[in-house]
Image (cartoon, rainbow, N blue to C red):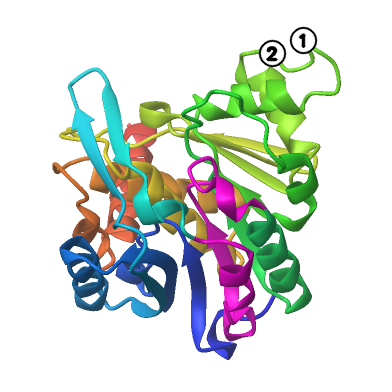
């Protein structure tokens, strides 16, 4: 893996990541429309310190929008796809992977037109010495297949949540019934395909497997206001730790801390990841648990 400091960008992201807020240099690669929402998103990227030079504006598409409906016991998303599904093979070939240490893709099931482009992007990224990660997101068609079998060898870190993981494992299993609905059943199935699998378990924390190593790390107890973007925040924390070579358990713990912090305010509260807040939460909880065990 290329050291984080050796290239202009630490991360090129095709999808949602809050990495700019925890000290990494991020370039966003995406398509937006030539409309007011496109103007807004570009301004927000600039405000957040994210390089937007790889964002393409399309006159033939409107900017995609997702509305989050967050309730105390559940949540739902309503999406106008628009330019979210704009990236294609030509788009992928223009992304300068040699300028980054890591390439991340999200919105796998929303970007159907990007299938060939994503494979090309990850192939080029690996050839250039980059590490890679993929967050599949929810499949609105609930087919849970796609080209993940072909893509898996190019993915260093696979980042589904507890709803997505068992369904994807069932779709990828060699025989029907090989992937049980419980963690001990579906995690090994995914780990046979992907180098590192990290499953986000909501308030329960997260579990991960890399080869024979398997860890489960409990979540942080916080007052939850809204779980919107907690998965993206988790990804940010985990990938940052992964890039600096932290052990698997420590990487998962950092992801948990970032997700927990964002959950404490409504909306995408990514600003809560600034000023060393994830490290402070980890240290505070560690001190508390150490004090309790010593009583």
Q: Disc 1 on helix, strand or loop?
A: loop
Whether residue 163 is situated above or below residue 275 in the rendered picture = above
Give me the disc on residue 59: none
Callout 2–callout 1 Cβ contact below 8 Å: yes
The reply to whether residue 286 is visible in this rendering is: no
What segment is highlighted magenta in the picture?
87-115
Q: Is residue 258 left or right of residue 215?
A: left
Residue position marked by numbered label 1 in the rendering? 177
Pick out the residue farthest to the right. Answer: 174
Label 2: how many Cα within 10 Å (few below 14, some 14–19, many 20+):
some
Whether residue 231 is situated above or below residue 59 in the rendered picture = above
Residue depicted at x 42% and y 58%: 236
Q: In the rendered structure, does residue 98 fall within the stretch colored magenta?
A: yes
Q: CA distance from mark 2 to mark 1?
A: 6 Å
Residue depicted at x 40% and y 59%: 17
Pick out the residue farthest to the front. Answer: 60
Q: Is residue 195 left or right of residue 216?
A: right
Q: Position of residue 259 (x, y in %)?
A: 34, 45
Q: Position of residue 40 (x, y in %)?
A: 17, 67
């Amino acid at each position: 893996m290329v050291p984080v400091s050796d290239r202009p960008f630490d991360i090129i992201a095709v999808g949602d990541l809050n990495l700019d807020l925890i000290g990494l240099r991020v370039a966003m690669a995406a398509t937006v429309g030539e409309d007011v929402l496109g103007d807004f998103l570009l301004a927000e990227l600039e405000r957040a310190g994210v390089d937007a030079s790889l964002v393409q504006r399309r006159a033939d598409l409107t900017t995609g929008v997702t509305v989050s409906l967050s309730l105390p016991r559940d949540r739902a998303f309503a999406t106008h796809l628009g330019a979210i599904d704009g990236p294609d093979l030509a788009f992928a070939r223009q992304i300068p992977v040699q300028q980054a240490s890591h390439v991340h893709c999200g919105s796998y099931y929303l970007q159907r037109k990007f299938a060939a482009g994503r494979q090309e992007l990850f192939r080029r990224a690996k050839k250039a010495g980059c590490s890679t990660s993929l967050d599949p997101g929810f499949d609105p068609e609930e087919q849970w297949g796609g080209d993940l079998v072909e893509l898996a060898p190019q993915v260093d870190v696979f980042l589904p949540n507890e709803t997505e993981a068992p369904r994807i494992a069932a779709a990828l299993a060699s025989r029907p019934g090989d992937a049980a609905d419980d963690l001990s059943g579906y995690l090994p199935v995914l780990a046979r395909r992907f180098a590192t699998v990290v499953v986000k378990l909501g308030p329960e924390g997260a579990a991960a497997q890399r080869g024979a190593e398997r860890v489960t790390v409990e979540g942080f107890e916080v007052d939850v206001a809204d779980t919107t973007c907690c998965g993206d925040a988790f990804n940010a924390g985990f990938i940052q730790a992964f890039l600096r070579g932290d052990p698997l358990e420590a990487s998962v713990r950092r992801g948990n801390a970032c997700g927990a912090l964002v959950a404490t305010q409504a909306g995408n509260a990514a600003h809560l990841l600034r000023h060393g807040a994830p490290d402070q939460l980890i240290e505070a909880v560690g001190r508390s648990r150490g004090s309790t065990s010593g009583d």
